[in-house]
Every structure is written in C-alpha cells, then in structure tokens.
C-alpha cells in the first residue's frame, strides 16, 4: 500500500486565514522569512499524519486569534484512491478528526495511515536536551507503526497520573498498592516495546553515523528507569518479564522517597538513551558537529525503521534544518530526500540548497501567498 500527500488546506489555523497548498510527489520547499507561518504548516502536516505535533499544542492555540474554528484538510492518495483527513478545532475544545467524512474517536485513529518523521532544529540538540525528547523520538515511531504501542502509551500515562495523585495526596496504602501493580503491568509492556524499537533504530543509526562521520564509533544504549533509580542488576529491558521484576524491585527501593516527594520515580516516564562516541559520553564530550551528526543519523534511522515496519515511506518533514547543518551533513540529508521520499522542507533562504535539489523541487513562496 502506498500513501502520498497531495494537498493541504488550512483555514483559520494558527496565523493562516486560508492556505491552499499543493504538495509535490517528491520535494516541496516552503520558502519565506521568519514568522510567515512555515513551522505552522509543518505542525499541521504532522497533526494530520502522526496525530500529534512536536509542539504539543493546547487545542485553542491552533485556532487563529479572533476566529471560532480551525480547519485542516489533508488530501491523500492511497494507491491512487483519493482519501481525505479532516481536523476541526473549536475554541477551547478537543481536536476532532474525520476520515473520509466519518468522525473517528481519537487522534490515534489517524496514526497508521500516512505516517511522518519530523526533523526540527530542536531535534539537533537531542543529546543535550532532557530525556523526554529522546523518549518522544522513539515513541513517535512506535505510536505510528503500532496500535498496541499507542494504546499502551496512553494507558500508562493515565495510570501514572492516577498513581501520582494518590502519592501526592498521601492516599490509602492499599490503593497505592493496587495502583503500583497496574503501573508495573502497563509500564513493563511499554518499556519492553520501547527498548526493542529503540534498539532497532539505534542499530541503523550507528551505521549511518559511521558513514556521516567518516568511520567514528557511536554506541547507543537504552537506559531503563530502574538503572537511574539505582537498581544494581543487569536486566534486559526488551523482555517484558524481566522488566516487570526490575520495576517491582526498584519501586520497593524508592517507596519511601516516592511518598515523601509525592511522585512516581520509576517507570517508562524515566527511561532514557545514552550515546557514546569512541567510548566517551556524547553529552559531555561530543562537539556540536558530532551531536548534530548523531541527531541526523537517528532521524534517518527512524525513517528506515518506519519503512521496514510499514512497508511504505513516511512523509519527511524538515523544518529549517538545512541552515543548521554543514555541507557534508546537508548533502547526506539531501541524498535521502533525493532518494525518492516525499518531503516537505521549510527554509528562509534557497542558498542552503544544492542546485540539483532545487531544480527538481516544487518551490512555494509562502511570503507571497494571499491569506
Ligand atoms: N493561534 C494563532 N493565531 C494567530 N497567529 C498565530 C497563532 N499561533 C501562532 N501564530 C503566529 O504565527 C506566526 C508564524 O509562526 P511560524 O509558523 O513559527 O513562522 P515561521 O516558521 O515561518 O518562522 C508567528 O508570528 C505566531 O505569532
Ligand atoms: Mg519556523
């Protein structure tokens, strides 16, 4: 099955009163000075494909100031059959999706159709940023390729919030025990799925990094929450069974502290990834260029893993990243784009692009679109 995005319509979405955008089969370049609304377009495309956006917007922020309702329509082709995904957001209300005119229950129903990989300047700092960024990098793939992954993630989030309320309000010990049991069951499933997926992405990223860096040795390790909580045992995080035991043991270790601090200290919400180059922690020792190479390798690996699992290429959304990369890395990214993956890329300046790319691209000057 092959999906392709054909057309994006925005009405009263963010700064756009009206935008009617044709998307090329290959590369579409969105050109415009700062604050034209380029990132807003990328956000809309991600909402229509991944069912979420890297900005994690509150629904009302999507609606154009002074308007009542935002509307986004993405026209796609599924093996040459036209389909339409629609998103409506009314002031203060939830996001409501429709697929071919039929309302769907939640954003997760949008996932698993045309999927996407987004690459923003923030991702370039993934090594140095807080661990939630690295977890999100894995989960965005997982949620799009597997309904089960997405359901477990959602369930875990709910159970974690419930348990934290009990801890914070000094709740009944029996109730906390029940909440702990539920958290462990769901958390073991999430950590194990996440660790397996992370290993798969990491394996490819290591190879891509060697290629980009000219042979440097990158290692990527999944760091489960119990390790961070001080459980001194070798546990394979990709096994649900051993993960479950490790969570139980480490929760016992931190029980008093959890009560004191009123929050859950072990579980998938504290998993992380660690990167080392030639045996040295990339967080402390990698140059900015090396960090950017890791981020690029990781993103390209995400694309490949997604393609392996879904047997179709995701839509690649590149927000302002070309200007942040040096020539070598830019060329590596350009090679992927030219390898025939549908791509939407934003930039303030076409000078960052090789002429061979520009020649084949559809260039849309967003600074000159009537809106
Ligand atoms: N809900 C909204 N209503 C009106 N304008 C908005 C809304 N949300 C964001 N904006 C505006 O959209 C503008 C363009 O944002 P952005 O897409 O980030 O620009 P670019 O990526 O082209 O630099 C910003 O000036 C921002 O203030
Ligand atoms: Mg921007």
Image (tube, rainbow, N blue to C red):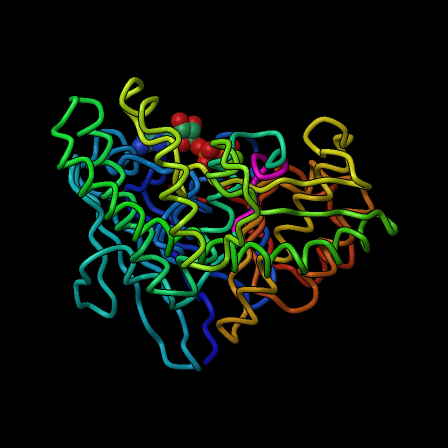
- Residue 217 lies, in percent from the top left, at 81, 48
Q: In this view, does 266 lie above or below 210?
A: above
Q: Nearer the viewer, residue 114 or 261?
A: 261
What residue sits 48% from the left and 30% below the top?
A: 35
Q: Where is residue 111 in the image (x, y as percent from the top left)?
A: 35, 61
Is the residue 300 above or below the residue 17 in the image? below
Question: Left or right: where does residue 189 sit relative to residue 164?
Answer: right
Name the residue nearer the viewer: 248 or 103.
248
**Image quadrant assignment for residue 346:** top right
The magenta stretch is 118-124
Residue 36 seen from this side: no
Closer-to-camera residue (296/245): 245
* Residue at x-position 33% and y-position 36%: 57
Quadrant housing the N terminus: bottom left
Above or below, 1 against 27 in this view is below
Q: In which quarter of the image is residue 173?
A: top left
Q: In which quarter of the image is the C terminus?
A: top left
Report whether 357 appears left or right of 2.
right
The residue closer to the viewer here, 185 or 346, is 185
From where the camera sits, is residue 349 visible? yes
């Amino acid at each position: 099955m092959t999906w392709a995005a054909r057309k994006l319509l925005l009405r009263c979405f963010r700064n756009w009163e009206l935008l009617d955008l044709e998307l090329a089969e290959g590369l579409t370049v969105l050109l415009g000075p700062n604050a034209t609304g380029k990132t807003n377009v990328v956000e809309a495309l991600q909402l229509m494909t991944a069912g979420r956006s890297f900005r994690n917007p509150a629904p009302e922020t999507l609606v154009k100031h002074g308007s009542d309702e935002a509307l986004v329509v993405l026209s796609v082709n599924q093996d040459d059959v036209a389909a339409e995904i629609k998103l409506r957001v009314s002031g203060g209300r939830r996001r409501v999706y429709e697929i071919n005119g039929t309302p769907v229950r939640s954003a997760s129903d949008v996932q698993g159709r045309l999927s996407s990989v987004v690459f923003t300047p923030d991702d370039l700092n993934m090594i140095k940023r807080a661990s939630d960024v690295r977890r999100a990098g894995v989960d965005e793939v997982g949620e799009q390729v597997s309904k089960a992954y997405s359901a477990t993630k959602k369930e875990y989030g709910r159970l974690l919030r419930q348990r934290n309320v009990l801890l914070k309000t000094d709740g009944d010990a029996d109730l906390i025990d029940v909440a702990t049991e539920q958290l462990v069951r769901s958390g073991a499933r999430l950590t194990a799925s996440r660790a397996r997926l992370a290993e798969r992405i990491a394996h490819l990223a290591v190879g891509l990094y060697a290629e980009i860096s000219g042979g440097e040795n990158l290692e990527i390790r999944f760091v489960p929450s119990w390790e961070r909580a001080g459980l001194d045992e070798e546990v394979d995080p990709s096994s649900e069974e051993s993960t479950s035991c490790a969570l139980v043991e480490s929760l016992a270790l931190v029980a008093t502290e959890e009560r004191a601090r009123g929050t859950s200290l072990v579980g998938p919400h504290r998993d992380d990834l660690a990167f080392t180059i030639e045996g040295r922690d990339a967080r402390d020792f990698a140059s900015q260029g090396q960090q950017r190479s890791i981020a690029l390798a990781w993103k390209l690996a995400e694309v490949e893993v997604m393609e392996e699992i879904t047997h179709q290429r995701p839509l690649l959304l590149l927000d302002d990243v070309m200007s942040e990369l040096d020539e070598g890395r830019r060329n590596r990214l350009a090679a992927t784009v030219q390898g025939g993956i549908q791509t939407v890329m934003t930039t303030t300046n076409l000078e960052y692009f090789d002429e061979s790319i520009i020649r084949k691209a559809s260039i849309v000057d967003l600074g000159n679109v009537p809106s």
